[in-house]
Image (cartoon, rainbow, N blue to C red):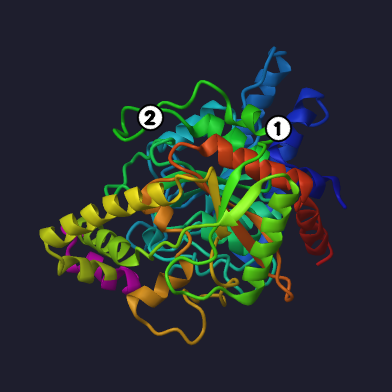
Amino acid sequence: MAMETTLATRSAAQLAALYRDRACSPVDVVDAVLDRIKRTNPSCNAVVTVAAEQARADAVRLEADWGRGADSLPALFGIPVTVKDLTATKGIRTTRGSLVHRQWVPDFDAVAVERLRAAGAIIVGKTNTSEEGWQADSGNRVFGPTANPWRSDRTAGGSSGGAAAAVALGCGPIGTGTDGAGSIRIPASFCGVVGLKPSFGLVPYHPSSAELLSHFGPLTRTVADAATALDVLAGRDDRDAHSWGRPPFGFAARTEVAPANLRIALIRRIGERPVHPEIAEALETFAGRLADLGHAVREGPKLDDPYDVLEVILAAHAAADHRSDPAEVLDLLDPGLRAVVERGATLTATSLAAAQIERTAFREHARQALAGFDVAVMPTVATLPLRLGADRPPGEDHTARARLAWASFVYPWNLAGFPAISIPGGFSGGGLPIGVQIVGPGRADALILRLARQVESAHGWLDSYQNLADKDAGR
């Protein structure tokens, strides 16, 4: 395998070690990742705007600083990062997957991007998303769909599917995503990567998301890289009134200590949706691994599917976001998103208030139901990766509920604000990734990262990415 491919598929932790030993430079790494994007993107369509000129300039600047012999390097020094195309990046086109915004070049960075740059990260490009992140797919009418890196006839999922696919393919070890109803964890499951939705407010979300469902988080190939990214991203910022101060310890350092004797709830179903047999089998295998690690795995509580609450909140806020748009702007919206906006316009203030009351009740119910456990484990989603361009399994009806019913394991934790991480749980007989999800109580981010890393260390999945890189290199 070429040296360029080897550098491109290294984790952030591995690249940091190479930098410390001066075995490679930021320019070497950025050039390797840009070459990787050039070779993989035509078949996958993960990176929709490549920031080659800015990335190389940043790499040269960092290399010059490095050459002056700094005593210590920032946490993400020289690490190539991709940013979801919903998130504002100064000087880099940010289309939001929308014909309305297809030419927008922000003159500011989102708070999270500010923090990434301050930590030495190099933004190499923007990754694909559904329009305004409205559905669990990453296709839009500006760039088209993102294919699954393991099977090109399947979707990468969404709405952070471009980020998940890019990370799986080695187009940077860290991708950033947003998650309002599973948009980090669904593509993490479909693409076989790690996807972390932190506790609500741990990572500032600005420009803000008024429905208070959206979380900003990393997608990576390793749990350690996710923890390092969270160390950089976490902490209060006054521009987000709901953000809060991070703990006085580092998440990356904490993940190095394996947890012991955890009480783990095994949740096989939320609501009435059946789970694909191969996913159910993978969950049982995962539960067995947890027991082998010394944890007590017990049957978890039954939880109702809170989709109706979610749907009202999302539709009402979509309508509010577009309330001042003239007809010619509304005509440019994806028809599915337009239908959500129109549905929201029919809702009353009482309906939205009732949904918010029910949301609070659901959070309290979930908190009490899990009170006897340290964490819960469950599938990430109930289905294998969908066909390319699809937003629901074949044979499903076209109601709003059917569009996301197969994701009933992810959006409850947006409503509750609990931290959740999707990690690889194996492959189907047809070679499609399967994700398993670890959920903790509010602000237990360090605990779910520790457990995820313990599983990764004992039953790692890292060879799978090397196999994917080898397959691609042989094309």
Judged left or right of residue 291, residue 322 is left
Q: Is residue 149 visible?
A: no
Q: Earlier in the sequence, mark 2 or mark 1?
A: 1
Q: Tell me the residue that label 1 is attached to.
A: 26
Residue shown at the point (68%, 16%) measured from the top left = 72
Q: Decide: marks 2, 1 in contact (CB < 8 A)?
A: no
Q: Tag 2: residue type?
A: Trp
Query: Can you tell which quarter of the image residue 451 is in?
Result: top right
Residue 366's x, y, as percent?
39, 52
The span from disc 2 to disc 1 (Cα, nearest Å) is: 33 Å
Residue shown at the point (86%, 50%) measured from the top left = 2
Secondary structure beneath label 1: helix
Please determine whether, in this image, residue 97 is positioned above or below residue 452: below
Q: Tell me the residue that label 2 is attached to.
A: 244
Residue shown at the point (67%, 37%) measured from the top left = 260
Residue 1's x, y, as percent?
88, 53
Residue 358's x, y, as percent?
25, 56
- Nearest the viewer among 293 and 396 is 293
Q: Which residue of the protein is positioned furthest toward the bottom in this rendering?
A: 395
Please determine whether, in this image, residue 213 is positioned above or below residue 443: below
Report the magenta residues as a range: 321-339
